[in-house]
Image: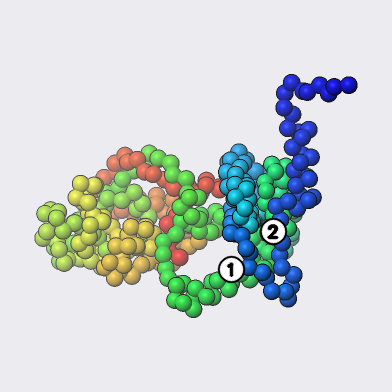
Amino acid sequence: MPHELPKSYEPGAIETRWADYWIKEKLFSVPTPAPGLPSEKPTRPVFTLLLPPPNVTGRLHMGHMLNQTQMDIIARWHRMRGFVTLWLPGTDHAGIATQMMVERQLAKEGKKRRDLGREKFVERVWEWKKLYGGAILDQMKRLGASVDWDREYFTMDENLSHAVREVFVRLYEEGLIYRGKYIVNWCPRCETAISDLEVKHEDFQGELYEIRYPVIGADEFITIATTRPETMLGDTAVAVNARDERYAHLHGKAVRLPLVGRTIPIILDEIAQPEFGTGAVKITPAHDPNDFEAGKRHNLLPIDVMDEHARMNENAGPSYQGMDRLDARALVLRDLQDQGFLVAVKPHTIPLGKCDRCGTIVEPRLS
């Protein structure tokens, strides 16, 4: 009796069986030499592709599927050309992102990570990895990715950690790794540095504050414009542009920092643009990446006025120490107003950077 072909393709009835068969038969495995035996040099050309390990923060999405399909095409094409082809699979621990997901899970239970303590919280993180790491691998197998499952890895596997340490030490011994201070994107809520890719920028209708700094030895002020008056407590200079004739008579002079009383120099730097604000800008190397570079150009010592929680520290002075940065801003503005240093407050659109994980305003921080 002839078989009747279905009118539509049903992938669930066909693809699962073949995907399981490929894994069972190890069709995409590249044999590893037995311990102690010399490895033979391949007589065929070799092609190796590392799967960018997906984070164990959930399940695969369409972006992963597109990415892996493209890599699968490349791997299969090289096999068809006769190459010894290894496509290496794995998953990534994605520490901070995974921590955030587990914390959200705990929040639904009315708990915080500090309620559990370090050991219990780490146990919960490993439980999460077991659940979602396994789900991600099952999805890849269901997709039919032609990887070598015998070589599956996890970024916190001991052999990988050993390899990372080995490479790090080699680079250090070759003088290619060194330690120094730089401005990082700091999330006060996650208490960690995050990459530029993890900062989400949103335009925010804020204010531009004009503040006047008394010039030392002269009966005049120089007015600067800033969107972050609370950081002025860490100012180490005021910059003007050498081309700006308005400030030519102030070259080489110094000013007294309002509220603090510290004497800081007036420097000439391209960071000051005559057409923006008043043409004069405050330089706070510890709290702005551009100011940090300007500080290096002029050998200015950075003064950090915030802690890791974005609260003002002892360098901010006793009037502001311990305050949240935004609360400190309000008090700084009030004090500037009371002492006659606040000239104007103007509407200004600010590109505000927020942590992509939790939405907290990111703080440029010296680290």
Examine the rendering and report whether any part of residue 203 can be seen. Answer: yes
Give the position of the N terminus as an image quadrant. Answer: top right
Give the position of the C terminus as an image quadrant. Answer: bottom left
Examine the rendering and report whether any part of residue 235 can be seen. Answer: no
What is the x, y in percent for residue 74? 58, 47
Nearer to us of marks 1 and 2 is 2
Question: In what element is the residue under mark 2?
Answer: loop
What is the x, y in percent for residue 34? 74, 70
Which residue in the protein does label 1 denote?
164
Which residue in the protein does label 2 denote?
30
Viewed as shown, does residue 133 lie left or right of 284? Answer: right
Q: What separation in Å lies between label 1 and label 2 (alpha carbons)?
A: 23 Å
The image shows residue 109, relative to residue 320, as above or below, that is above
Camera-nearest residue between 28 and 310:
28
Residue at (73% x, 32% y) in the render: 11
Residue at (23% x, 66% y) in the render: 265
Callout 2 amino acid: Val
Camera-nearest residue between 319 and 176:
176
Residue at (66% x, 69% y) in the render: 40
Residue at (23% x, 47% y) in the render: 276
Q: Earlier in the sequence, mark 1 or mark 2?
A: 2
How many numbered tags mark residues here? 2
